[in-house]
């Protein structure tokens, strides 16, 4: 094809454009009414009591770590298969990310490995709903309760996914989302934290605005200008421009997810009889709002992953790899003296995986072209 098909892409229509234009013409384009509208709509969609919008998914992760008290010397258990932000947020707080391996089927954090890594210093577990597939939340909640740990769900891939009919965003103590353009819905850049805990909610609201605390009692006593700062905070605010786009995108999320699942099913049907490939699966009790489609090239295949990857790229398909396991990155490998032998499943997955294009605006022609080209590539 003459035009490159990216692995992910935003789905913006005229209604999205018009709501953004409306805010641009309004009196306030940040710290205005659109933030509350988006937070309320998001909380309702994921079944949580509270939502706090942030400037990015990374900001959401950092804020969640601060809100639950992660500090110098604390350990937080994190899957090695994730984007680097899932571990970096712990370092930002002075904590130590303790990396663990994944399950080979769901590619989510291995709960048995998690329990083996728990120490007296362990403060929290960050589980990732990888590619949109929920982690094993029943097991994780039992483990967190047993050891009195905070559960953080990095659901950057998984808005709209469900675990045993419970929406992702309502299960963990804190859940973080990303609204980057390749995600199911976008606000350009942006993120959010959802929670059912009012204490976390109040902390998060202050954290994203420099730690500033202000209310009517203070204003009456000292003047309308008065505010107080009791804790260190950050400028992690989302703008009203982004929030308005987010509300518009949320109104279409069901159709976005339906389209993504249809493409996922079409890929699985097309590749199901190709023995050289390992395909993603949806476990019983899970509903996956697929973010990426990860296909794996088995060792017995005639072509290497690199050969197939390059063939697809040359054909105009923006295939990608998600992700280089965190333990393989120099920052972590050298700093914590990590060895490949500790992460056999993630190591094997990384050698084999590629992410094929998957987004709501993909045409049938593009999907069929990806299918045909991958089949040609592995011959």
Image (spheres, helix red, strand yellow):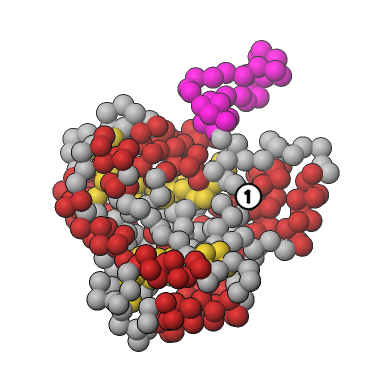
Instruction: Find disc 1 in the rendering and name its residue.
Output: 188
Q: Residue furthest bottom?
A: 273
- In the image shown, does 9 or 66 lie closer to the viewer? 9
Can you give x and y, in whole percent of width and height, for residue 176 in the image?
A: 46, 48
Question: Is residue 300 among what the camera can see?
Answer: yes
**Nearer-the-camera pick, 49 or 6:** 6
Is residue 294 found left or right of 262 in the rendered image?
Answer: left
Number of numbered discs: 1
Residue 13 location in percent, x, y?
72, 63
Is 217 magenta? The answer is yes
> Which residue does the image show at 63% across and 50% down from the upper left?
188
Residue extent of the magenta highlight: 206-235
Residue at horizontal 32 percent and vertical 52 percent from the top: 325
Q: Residue furthest top?
A: 222
Q: Name above or below for residue 45 compared with residue 118.
A: below
In this picture, residue 240 sits left or right of residue 191: right
Classify 265 as above or below 286.
below
Q: Residue shown at 44%/42% (left/top)? A: 61
């Amino acid at each position: 094809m003459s035009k490159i098909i990216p692995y992910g892409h935003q789905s913006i229509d005229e209604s999205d454009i018009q709501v953004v234009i409306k805010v641009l013409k309004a009196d306030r384009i940040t710290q205005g009414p659109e933030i509350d509208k988006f937070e309320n709509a998001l909380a309702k969609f994921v079944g949580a009591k509270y939502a706090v919008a942030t400037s990015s998914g990374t900001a959401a992760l950092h804020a969640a770590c601060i809100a639950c008290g992660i500090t110098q010397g604390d350990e937080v258990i994190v899957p090695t298969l994730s984007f680097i932000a899932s571990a970096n947020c712990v370092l930002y707080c002075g904590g130590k990310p303790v990396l663990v391996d994944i399950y080979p089927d769901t590619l989510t954090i291995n709960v048995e490995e998690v329990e083996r890594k728990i120490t007296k210093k362990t403060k929290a577990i960050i589980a990732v709903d990888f590619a949109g597939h929920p982690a094993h939340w029943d097991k994780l909640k039992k483990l967190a309760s047993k050891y009195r740990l905070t559960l953080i769900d990095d659901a950057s891939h998984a808005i709209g996914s469900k675990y045993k009919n419970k929406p992702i965003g309502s299960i963990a103590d804190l859940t973080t989302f990303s609204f980057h353009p390749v995600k199911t819905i976008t606000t350009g850049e942006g993120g959010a934290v959802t929670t059912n805990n009012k204490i976390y909610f109040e902390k998060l609201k202050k954290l994203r605005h420099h730690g500033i605390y202000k209310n009517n009692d203070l204003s009456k006593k000292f003047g309308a200008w008065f505010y107080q700062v009791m804790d260190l905070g950050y400028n992690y605010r989302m703008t009203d421009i982004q929030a308005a786009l987010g509300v518009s995108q949320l109104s279409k999320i069901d159709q976005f997810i339906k389209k993504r699942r249809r493409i996922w099913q079409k890929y699985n049907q097309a590749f199901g009889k190709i023995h050289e490939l390992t395909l993603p699966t949806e476990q019983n009790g899970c509903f996956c709002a697929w973010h990426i489609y990860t296909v794996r090239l088995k060792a017995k295949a005639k072509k290497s992953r690199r050969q197939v990857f390059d063939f697809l790229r040359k054909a105009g398909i923006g295939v990608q790899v998600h992700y280089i396991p965190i333990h393989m990155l120099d920052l972590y490998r050298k700093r914590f003296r990590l060895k490949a032998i500790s992460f056999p499943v993630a190591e094997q997955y990384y050698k084999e995986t590629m992410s094929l294009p998957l987004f709501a605006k993909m045409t049938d022609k593009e999907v069929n072209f990806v299918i045909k080209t991958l089949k040609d590539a592995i011959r």
